[in-house]
Amino acid sequence: MSDSPHLGLYLHIPFCERKCPYCDFNTYAGMESLHQATVDALCTEMAQRAGLVAGRTITTVFVGGGTPTVLTPRQLQQLFEAMHRLFNVAESAEITCEANPGAVDREKFATLRSLGVNRLSMGVQSFRPDELQFLGRIHSVEDVHHAYDAARRVGFDNINLDFIFGLPEQDAAAWQETLDQALTLAPEHLSLYSLIVEPNTPLFHWVESGKVAEPDNDSAADFYEMAMAQLAEAGYIHYEVSNWARQTTPDDACSETPHFACRHNLIYWRNQDYLGIGPGAHSHLRRQNDDEKRWGNRKPVAGYNRRVASGEAIEEFIEKIPPRLAMAESMMVGLRLVREGVRHDRFMAQHGVAATDIFRTELNQLCADGLLTIDDERIRLTRRGLLMGNQVFLQFLPEA
C-alpha cells in the first residue's frame, strides 16, 4: 500500500454497561451474550485483513468503543494475542485502551498493562455528581479517583482523561470545578469536548421536546477559552483543537507535537493510514499512484458477527477518494493541529502539489478574515479561527 511509515490499528469494542443519552457511537448495552462471539469475529477479521498491510509495521494501536474494559481478562488476552500474531506491531508502538472509571478495577488495569497497553484513556466527563447523572454515566466522582489511583499503582504513566463542557444550563463555576479537579490529578493528557446534540439520541429528543434546554454555543465558547487559559497556566500544551498534553521536557515548549500527544490520533489528523477492525470501524489506506480507499464495516453487531463467521463481505460501504477530496480532507483534519497545522512539505509529499496552489482563493479569503496564518513552513488557525473551526474547515470541501 502506502510508503508512509505511520500505520494505525483501531479495534472497536461495541459494548457498554449503559448507553449514554448523548452518545451516537456504534455501541450497545445489554448484549453480554454477544461478547465472546464478537471477540471471535474481531480476531477473524484481523486474520482476513492482515494481508492488506503485509510488510508494514503497526506504529499505534487504539482499543476503543464502547467500553473495552467490559470484556473479561481472557477475552482481552485473546484479542491481543491475535493482534500480535497477525500484525507486525512495533516494540515502541503506542497502545491505548479506553476505560470507564465505573467498569474497571486494579486487576483489570493490571491485565491491560501485562498485555502491553501503555496508554490509558478514561471517560470521566465531569467531576460534578449532578452532571454525571445527567450524562448517564455509571461512575461517581469517587470512582474516578479510585480508578485513577489504581491505574497509577499498576504502572500507567500515560493517562488521558476525557471531559465534556457546554451542558444545558451549565455555569462557569461548575466547569471551573471540573477543571480544578482534573488539574489536581495532573494526567499526562486531557481531551475536552463541547457537548453536541446528535440526531437520534435520547438527548436530541429531550431537547426537541423541550424537556432539556438546548446547549448554549456562546457559553460553550466561553468555557473553551477558560480551559485554554487555565491549562496553559498549568503547563499543558494545546496541540489540537480539543486536546492538551502536559509539558514534560524543555523541548515540549517549542515542539509541534509534545511528548504526550496522542500518537494514534495524530495519524487521523495528518490524514495517514489506519486499519479499523470491528462493527462500524472505518479504514483508510492509500496506494501509491492511485486514489485513496476508505471503507466502513457493518454496524449491527449480530450481522457483523454472522458475516465474518461465514466469510461474507462485511463492508457497509467502500469508496475511492478522488485527489481533490483527499486534499480537502488533509486541510480539514490538519488544521485541527494547533501548533503543527498543515505543513507545506507534508501536504506536498502526500498529494504532489502545494496546498497554496490548490486552495489559493480559499486561503486568501480565510487569511483576510483573520482565521488563518500562512508562513514558510505551515498553514495554521489563528486564535479566532480556533473558535470558528468548523466554518473554516467547510471552506475546503469541493462544491457539490
Image (cartoon, rainbow, N blue to C red):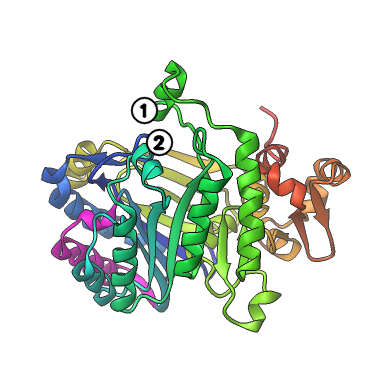
Residue 240 percent coordinates (x, y): 61, 58
Viewer-nearest residue: 293 or 107: 107
In the image, is residue 360 part of the stretch drawn in magenta?
no
Residue 209 percent coordinates (x, y): 43, 16
Name the quadrant containing residue 132.
top left
Residue 104 percent coordinates (x, y): 24, 61
Asked if residue 314 lies left or right of residue 204, the reply is left
Residue 265 percent coordinates (x, y): 50, 59
Q: Which residues are magenta?
A: 67-90
Residue at 16% from the left image edge and 61% from the top image edge: 75
Name the quadrant containing residue 122.
bottom left
Marks 2 and 1: in contact by CB < 8 Å? yes
- The single residue placed furthest to the left in the displayed view is 33
Task: Determine crowd level at label 1: few under 14, some 14-19, many 20+ residues with C-alpha closer than 10 A.
Answer: some
To which residue does mark 2 refer? Answer: 22
Q: Is residue 122 visible?
A: yes
Residue at 31% from the left image edge and 55% from the top image edge: 100
Name the quadrant containing residue 29.
top left
The kind of residue on which mark 2 rests is Tyr
Relative to 381, is 197 above or below? above
C-alpha gap between disc 1 and disc 2: 7 Å
The kind of residue on which mark 1 rests is Pro
To which residue does mark 1 refer? Answer: 202
- Mark 1 or mark 2: whose residue is earlier in sequence: 2
- The single residue placed furthest to the bottom in the displayed view is 250
In the image, is residue 85 part of the stretch drawn in magenta?
yes
Relative to 27, is 8 above or below? below
- The single residue placed furthest to the top in the displayed view is 209
Q: Is residue 1 visible?
A: no
Residue at 61% from the left image edge and 50% from the top image edge: 333
Mark 1 secondary-structure assignment: helix
Magenta stretch, main secondary structure, is: helix
